[in-house]
Image: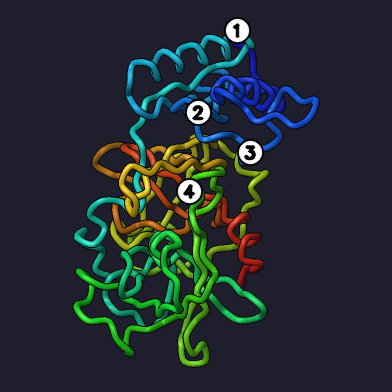
């Protein structure tokens, strides 16, 4: 097929999303939903988005069958045919639903340099709170001129079910440290966290915690030395705007996470209607839009594992952060837009 421009791929994607939504809410005089957040709960178990063509070098339509059921497979094939009829290459794959928190996060052994107590706080370190899970420190930002750290809501705030001020600790709890106390406190969580919605689509899984006694806490947006990566000791350079993610599909990305340390993957697609099971409420399914998909290199080198949630995902070429890792269904990992995280919390990048 000829090279498909990004604008044409986006137009085809929107047409396919109309097929995914069984009964789209309609504004007066409109035959299309106005935003993804307005879509009703009852939609097909399919994710649709933009990918890179493996043959033409242009753009392609990404379709993910999310339940493995035969009706979902048939629906995915119908979407594939519609996309091809419209002149698009199709990147079609099956994937299971993701789950947050990931099963086994509090049992997974972590990287020794990231789970041991550090004197300088850096991306990827083990963090958590006493009544929640364990995950990864993403990076540092500023809110109202004060330093703060960011990670996932399901790591720091029990997916929004926490209702009080909470101390954030490093290391983040068992199995990394047996007792959480005054000597492990690094930050304080107030109300800066996302509460998941089942009524509307979710865009981010994130929480922000203000550094505890910042005059006494050393911190850097520096990649941890000793991880045998090409970026050891370098600084994360800034934020990649969400609008620039799709033009860079196919690029190499990296992350530093509490469990797997430094890993790389391929920026594969940006998807709408990604299904995520909420482990806090059995049977509850969340939908995420603008989910950035990273494809693993192979089974032996996974991009993320349980305990890596909250890790900052960055471009290998210039170390700009594009997202926070929040879920991993099978041989792929998902991140939410870091630009959106900053906007939600009215925060800014720390150089």
Mark 2 element type: loop
Quadrant in the picture for residue 107: bottom left
Name the foreground residue: 42 vs 127. 42
Taking the spot 64% from the left edge, 11% from the top edge, the residue there is 86
Q: CA distance from mark 2 to mark 3?
A: 12 Å
- Decide: is 129 above or below 31: below
- Of circles 1 and 3, the one toward us is 3
Q: Earlier in the sequence, mark 2 or mark 3?
A: 3
Q: CA distance from mark 3 to mark 4?
A: 22 Å
Residue 38: mark in rendering: 3
Callouts 2 and 1 close, C-beta under 8 Å? no
- Decide: is 73 above or below 211: above
Q: CA distance from mark 1 to mark 3?
A: 28 Å
Callouts 3 and 4 close, C-beta under 8 Å? no
Answer yes or no: is residue 247 visible.
Answer: no
Residue 335: mark in rendering: 4
Q: Looking at the figure, which quarter contains the N terminus?
A: top right
Taking the spot 24% from the left edge, 63% from the top edge, the residue there is 110
In this figure, which residue is indicated by the disc labeled 1? 85
Horizontal side, residue 124 vs residue 177: left or right: right
In this figure, which residue is indicated by the disc labeled 2? 43
Name the foreground residue: 170 vs 97. 97
């Amino acid at each position: 097929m000829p090279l498909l421009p990004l604008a044409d791929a986006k137009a085809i994607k929107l047409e396919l999303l109309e097929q995914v939504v069984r009964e789209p809410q309609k504004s007066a005089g409109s035959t299309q939903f106005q935003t993804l957040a307005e879509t009703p709960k009852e939609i097909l178990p399919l994710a649709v988005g933009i990918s890179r063509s493996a043959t033409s070098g242009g753009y392609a339509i990404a379709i993910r069958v999310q339940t493995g059921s035969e009706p979902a497979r048939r629906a995915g094939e119908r979407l594939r045919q519609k996309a091809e009829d419209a002149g698009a290459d199709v990147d079609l794959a099956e994937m299971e639903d993701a789950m947050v928190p990931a099963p086994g996060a509090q049992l997974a052994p972590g990287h020794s340099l990231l789970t041991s107590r550090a004197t300088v706080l850096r991306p990827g370190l083990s963090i958590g709170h006493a009544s929640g899970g364990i995950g990864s420190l993403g990076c540092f930002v500023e809110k109202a001129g004060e330093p703060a750290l960011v990670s996932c809501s399901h790591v720091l705030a029990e997916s929004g079910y926490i209702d009080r001020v909470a101390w954030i600790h490093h290391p983040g709890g068992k199995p990394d440290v047996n007792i959480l106390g005054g000597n492990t406190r690094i930050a304080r969580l107030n109300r800066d966290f996302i509460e998941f919605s089942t009524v509307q689509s979710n865009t981010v899984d994130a929480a922000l915690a203000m550094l505890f006694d910042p005059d006494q806490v050393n911190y850097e947006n520096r990649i941890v030395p000793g991880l045998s990566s090409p970026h050891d000791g370098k600084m994360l350079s800034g934020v990649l705007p969400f609008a620039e993610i799709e033009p860079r599909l196919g690029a190499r990305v990296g992350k530093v996470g509490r469990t797997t340390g430094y890993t790389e993957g391929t920026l594969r697609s940006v998807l709408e209607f990604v299904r995520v099971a909420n482990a806090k409420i059995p049977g509850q399914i969340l939908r995420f839009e603008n989910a950035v998909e990273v494809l693993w290199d192979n089974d032996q080198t996974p991009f993320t594992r349980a305990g890596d949630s909250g890790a900052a995902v960055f471009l290998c070429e210039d170390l700009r952060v594009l997202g926070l890792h929040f879920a991993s269904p099978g041989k792929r990992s998902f991140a939410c837009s870091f630009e959106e995280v900053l906007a939600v919390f009215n925060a800014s990048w720390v150089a």
